[in-house]
C-alpha cells in the first residue's frame, strides 16, 4: 500500500534525527532557554529579514492557533476566518474553548475575499446593534489554504490594508508554509509575509519535523508575557530543545526550502499522472494537496491499493478525496502510483 | 559545569532515538492511531494489570493535568490539591483557564493528609452556604510529591476511600512515577496504583522520553469523547507515533523501571555525598529530588560549578535549593560533585 | 413621539407594582427561597401540566440562554441554532464565553427546518473526521422566532423526535412565549411545550415584568446543582422575591395569557393599518413583531414621529424595520399611528 | 419571628417603588440608554467629585465582581483578595469561571494588610519561576469587609500606592458601601474612595434597592467596550430604567447616606443590647454586621424567635453567628429583640 494520505505520515527529516542523537547528552536548560532554540530563532529572523522578530516554538497547529488567537483578542472580540478555515471546522472548538467566537465569512477556493472582508467590517460598524454582537478582533487566514490554494501578494496586501484600517491584526497560519512558498505560482517570499502580516507561524509538523511550529511576531510585537500564556495553555515543552533543534536544522542550509520544493515537484508529477489518467480535479491547487473527484465505485477500488483522504461528499455518486505529497514522498511511490492508475485505466473499472 | 538542575536536562534514552530512526520512513496514520501507540497501550495495560484500561498519550505534565482535571469536573466543581501542588502553584493558572478553582488544602511534606481531606469534605457539606461555594469535585495528588516524598499504600487507600465516600475521583499525577515506584521506601506497585486510583499518568518527559505522558483510566472509565477533548485543548499530536514509540520502548524489557532505579541509586549517592559534607536537608526525600539548605554565600559559590534549582527562601541568610538526579545522571557527574564538595569543605568558604 | 420600538419600552404590569408595594416590608429569605417563588413555581407547574417540573427564575434572556446551554453541554459539544438565532448573532458571544461553539444551520423565516437538522446530524456522524469537530450537543430554538414566526406542533414534534434519536435535548427560548401562544395561528399550548421540549423558558421581561424569565425543566430534569451554576455565572438574585412575585402575579388569574392576547390584538390592528396604507412586509408574522420594508426616504420621514427598530438593510434604497406591540400598547398609540400614516399616505412623501 | 438575618430581607425604599409607579408607562429606550440612567450617573459623579467618571449599572454583587475583575485582567493574571474575600469563598467560582485565579493573601479581621501585599508582590517577581505562575494583576478588597471592618484612609492609600508601584489597579467592592461610609469610625468619604481607587462599586441591593450596583471608573478609565463585556456575561438588563431609577432616587437628597446612617444607628443599639445581655463578639465591627459567639444550646434557643445567620463553627461547643441591621430595620424590631434577650437572660437557659 502506498500512501498519499497526508503530509504527516512519516517521521522527520534524517538530519533532524541525526542532530537529536549528536546533542542527546548535553545538559540543557528547559522551556526553550537552550542555545539551540536561540540559534533557531536567529536563523528564522534572518530568513524573514526581521531582526526584531519575537519567536516562540509550539508543538502543533491547533495549539498554535489557539494560543495566538486567544492572546491577541480582547474578551469581547472574535476572529474572522473563511468558512472553510481550520479553526472554524476542524479544531474541535479550540478557539471557542478560550471564550471567543470564530466569525466565518464566505470564501472562494479556501480564500478569504478582500471585498467580503471589507464589506463585513463596514456593515458591522454600521449596524446599530453592534454593541450586542461579537466584535471582529483579528483576521486569520492560512497559506496555503485548506484547499491548497494561494493568496497573491496583492491579495495579502489588500487584506493587510483592510485590517490596518480597522486596527485589527492579520494572522497567517503557515502549517504548510514551505509548500506555499515553493509553489511555482507563489509570488510571495518569507520576508514578504513577515512584512505584510502581524503574526504568522512556520509549520514544522507537515514540513519535515516530528512536531513543532515557529510563531513569528515580526515587529517585536508579541503579546505581553507570551511564555506564561503558553504555559497556561499547557503548551510549554519542558525539553524545548526538541523544538529548537528541529527548526535550527530546518533553517540551516535552506533545508526547509529544499524539502518543500521536493514536495511541490512530487505534487506536479502526481497531478500530471492523475491528469494523464483522466481524473478530474475539484479545484486547481498549486501546492502539495490535490483534490480529486472520484466516482464512488472507483474510490472503493483505488482504496485497496492507495491510501488517500476522504474530503467531502460531492453528490450521490461522487466523492472528493485528497492526495498529498510531502517532503518525504519518494519517486518510487510515484512510480507505483503510475503503475496502479495505468492498470486501472486499462479496464478494471469497465 | 555539572548539572543537577532538574530531571529533564538531557534528551532521551538512546533506545528511543534508535527506534525513531528505525521506523522513520514508515507511513503511519496520525493522531495516535498507529500500531506503535497500540502496542505501547497493550504493554502499559499489562504492566498495570489493567486489561480494561483506557490509555491516551499526551505531551507534557501541565497539559495532562489540565485535560484530565477539566474533563472530570462538572462546571460547578473544583479540584482539591495540597497547597504545594503543581496545579495550584506552577501551572500559570492552567486549571483556572478551564473555569475551575483549585481548592488547596494544608499539606505535610508535600502530601495531602487523609484526615484533613476528610475534615474539609465533611465541613463543606455541613456549611449551610455551600451552594454558594465551589464544590469539591476530585482530588489530585502527585507521586512522588513536589517535595519528592511518597504516600504509603495505606495513605493512598485512605484517600481513595474518602473520595469514594464522597463520590469524587482520585487522580494521581505521576510525572516522576518511576522515581517513586523504584524508591526503596515505596510500598506501592504500578498495579496497586491502577487498582487504587481512578486515573493517573505515567510520566515520560522526566523519565527517559523526549516528551510524553501516558494517561491511564484503569477501569475503562475515560470521559466520553476523550480524543475530542484532547483536540479541543490543542493537545492532539499529529504524529502520534512519536509518543507511542517512546512508551513502547520504555515499557519493553522493563526499561522504565531500570532507568528509574538508576536515578534512585544516583540519588542515594548524591544524598550520601551531601551528608558526608555536612549539608543539611530541608526534608527527607526518598526519591530523585533532594532539597538542601544552603547558606546564601555558600549558594553563590556552589553555583559557579554546579547547576541546581532555586526552591525557596528559608530565611534572611538561607535558601532551599533542589538537586535532582535522573535516568541520565552518570557516575562521572557524581564523582565531579564529590570532588567539588570536598574541596569546598576543606576551607574555601573560610 | 409614539413608540413601537420594541416590547420592553414600558415598565411592568400595574398589578406587579401593586404587589411589590404590598409585600415590601416582609422579611423574606434570599436567593429564591421565599414563599412567593414557591407559589409562582406551583402556579407555573400547574399551567404547564408538569407537576414534576424543576423551575428556576433568572433575570434576562441572554443570561438564561447562557446558563441553560452551558449547563446542558459537555465540554466538547456545541449548540445548534438557526443562523438567525439570538445566541448566534445578538448575545455578544455569551455562549462562546462559556467555551462552547454555536453551530448555525440554515433557516427559513427564522425557523430551523427539521430536514436540515436531520441532515446535519446524519452527516456529522458520517464524516470520518468528526472527532476533530465540535459535537452537536443540543438544539436551541425560539418560539416565536426572531422573525416573529411560529413552529407548528408538528414541526416541534419533528425536531423533538430528531433530538431524541441523537440523544440531545431540545431547548425552547420563550422570551416572547405568551405572544406566540396567544397568536391565532398557534396550534400549541403551554402543556404541549412542556411535554415536547426538554427545557424551555417563559419570558417575563417582554411580557409584563420589570425583568425575569422562568426556566422550566418539565420532567424533574434540571442539571445537578443548578443553583450553584446560576451563582457561578453571577446570576443569582439576592432578593429573589422580585422574580417570584412577578411570576406569581403573571400566573394568577391568567394574567400572562390576557396581556399576551392584548399584544396580539394590537399587532393585528397594527398590521391592518400598515396594509391599508400599502406598506409591504418582509415576511408574514403572526405575532407581536411586524417586519416592514421601507424606502429609505420614507424611513427617514416616519422616524420623526414614530419610534421603531432598524432590522436590516434590504438593498441600496430599502431597509427592513420592526414595529412591535406589547402588553402595554394602547389603543391611543394605535390611533396616533393611523393618523400619522394616513397623513403621510396622502402625499407628504411627494 | 424578627429577622436580623441579613441586609436584604426586605424590599426597596418606598421612594423607589413610588418612582417606579410614576414612570411606569413612559416609553424608554433599553439597555441603560434612558434618561433616568443618565440622571443617576450625573448624581453619582457629583457625589463622587468625579466629573470624568464612567458609570455602569449592574444587577448584583457577584456579577459585578465577575465582570469588573475579568475585564481588568490579562489572560495570564489573577486577582489578589484577602483569604476571607467574597470572590475567593462565596461566589461559587465566578472569577475562575472567567479563567482567572483568585490569589488569596493572609488577612486580619477581613482586611488585606498592606505589608503582606507588598511582600507578596516583591517575592513574586523575585521568584525565578514566576513566569510559570499566575501574575498578580489587580487587588480586590471590600469596604466594609466581609467582617464588617473598615480600612482607614491611610491603609487604603498604602494599598493604592503599592498597586501603583506594580502597575495594577485597586478595586473596591462596595456592596455595603453606605454602611461603611456612615460608620462613626470611618475616616473616608465617597470622593476619597473615587480618588484613591481605580474602580469601585456602590452597592444598591443591600442599601435600599430591589437590586443593582453602580460601578464607577472614576477617571474615565472603563475598559474598552464595557457595555459589550456586560452583554457577553449575560448581565445587560433590557429595562435598564429599573437600575437607573433606583440609583437616581438613592442619590437624590442624600437618601443613600440617610438610610445607611439609619442602619448604623440601629447596629449601635443592637450592639449595646447584646453587650448588656453579656453576649461576646467574635470581633469588633463598626458597621451593620455584628458577629456574635453563641454557645450551641443558646443558639438553638435563640433561633426559635430570632432569625440570624450562621457564620462559622468556632469550636465544639460554640458557633459564630451574624446579626445584621439594614436601611429597613425598625425600632420595633430592636425592642422585640431586647425583650427576647432580656427574658432569655433571666434564666430560660438554665
Image: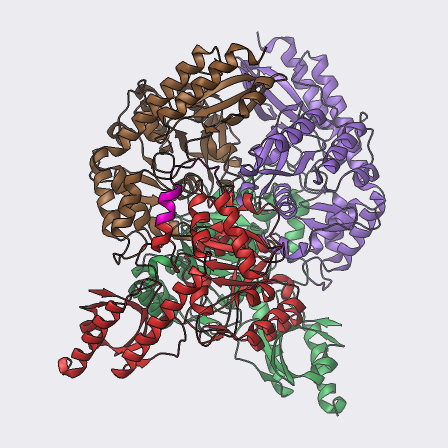
Chain colours: A brown, B red, C purple, D green
Residue at image position (73%, 62%) is C26
User: Is D107 placed above or below A37 here?
Assistant: below
Residue at image position (68%, 83%) is D296
User: Is D79 placed above or below A341 here?
Assistant: below
Closest to the observer, A163 or A143: A143
Residue at image position (75%, 46%) is C216
Give the prevailing secondary structure in the magenta stretch: loop
Closest to the observer, A96 or B86: B86
The quadrant where residue C237 appears:
bottom right
Closest to the observer, B29 or C207: B29
Q: What residue span does the magenta drawing correspond to?
A: B18-32
Q: Position of residue B190 (x, y in %)?
A: 53, 65
Quadrant in the picture for the C terminus of chain B: bottom left
Closest to the observer, A198 or A94: A94
Q: Position of residue D302 (x, y in %)?
A: 72, 80
Image-based side of B5 in relation to A101, left or right: left
On whether residue A178 falls in the magenta region, the answer is: no
Quadrant in the picture for the N terminus of chain B: bottom left
Is residue D184 in view?
no
Residue at image position (57%, 76%) is B154
Q: Position of residue A194 (x, y in %)?
A: 27, 32
Is residue A140 in view?
yes
On whether residue B28 falls in the magenta region, the answer is: yes
Image-based side of C78 in relation to C42, left or right: left
User: Is A122 placed above or below B267 here?
Assistant: above
Amino acid at each position: 500500500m502506498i500512501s498519499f494520505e497526508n503530509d504527516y505520515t512519516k517521521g522527520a527529516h534524517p538530519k533532524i534525527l541525526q542532530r537529536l542523537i549528536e546533542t542527546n547528552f548535553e545538559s540543557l536548560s528547559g522551556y526553550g532557554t537552550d542555545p539551540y532554540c536561540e540559534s533557531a530563532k536567529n536563523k528564522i529572523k534572518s530568513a524573514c529579514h526581521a531582526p526584531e522578530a519575537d519567536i516562540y516554538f509550539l508543538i502543533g497547529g491547533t495549539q498554535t492557533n489557539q494560543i495566538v488567537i486567544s492572546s491577541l483578542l480582547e474578551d469581547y472580540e472574535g476572529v474572522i476566518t473563511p468558512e472553510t478555515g481550520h479553526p472554524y471546522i476542524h479544531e474541535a472548538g479550540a478557539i471557542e474553548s478560550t471564550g471567543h467566537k470564530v466569525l466565518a465569512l464566505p470564501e472562494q477556493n479556501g480564500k478569504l475575499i478582500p471585498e467580503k472582508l471589507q464589506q463585513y467590517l463596514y456593515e458591522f460598524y454600521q449596524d446599530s446593534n453592534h454593541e450586542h454582537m461579537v466584535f471582529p478582533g483579528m483576521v486569520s487566514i492560512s497559506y496555503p489554504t485548506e484547499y491548497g490554494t494561494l493568496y497573491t501578494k496583492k491579495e495579502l496586501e489588500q487584506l493587510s490594508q483592510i485590517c490596518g484600517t480597522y486596527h485589527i491584526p492579520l494572522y497567517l497560519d503557515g502549517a504548510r508554509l514551505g509548500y506555499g512558498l515553493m509553489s511555482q505560482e507563489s509570488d510571495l517570499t518569507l520576508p514578504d509575509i513577515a512584512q505584510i502580516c502581524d503574526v504568522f507561524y512556520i509549520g514544522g509538523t507537515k514540513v519535515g519535523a516530528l512536531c513543532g511550529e515557529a510563531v513569528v511576531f515580526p515587529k517585536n510585537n508579541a503579546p505581553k508575557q507570551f511564555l506564561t500564556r503558553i504555559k497556561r495553555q499547557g503548551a510549554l515543552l519542558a525539553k524545548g530543545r526538541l523544538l529548537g533543534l528541529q527548526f535550527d536544522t530546518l533553517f540551516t542550509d535552506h533545508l526547509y526550502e529544499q524539502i518543500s520544493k521536493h514536495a511541490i515537484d512530487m505534487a506536479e508529477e502526481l497531478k500530471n499522472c492523475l491528469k494523464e489518467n483522466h481524473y478530474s480535479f475539484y479545484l486547481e491547487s498549486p501546492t502539495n494537496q490535490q483534490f480529486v473527484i472520484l466516482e464512488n465505485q472507483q474510490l472503493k477500488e483505488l482504496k485497496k491499493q492507495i491510501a488517500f483522504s476522504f474530503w467531502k461528499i460531492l453528490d450521490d455518486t461522487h466523492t472528493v478525496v485528497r492526495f498529498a505529497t510531502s517532503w518525504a514522498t519518494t519517486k518510487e511511490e510515484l512510480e507505483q502510483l503510475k503503475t496502479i492508475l495505468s492498470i486501472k485505466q486499462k479496464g478494471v473499472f469497465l
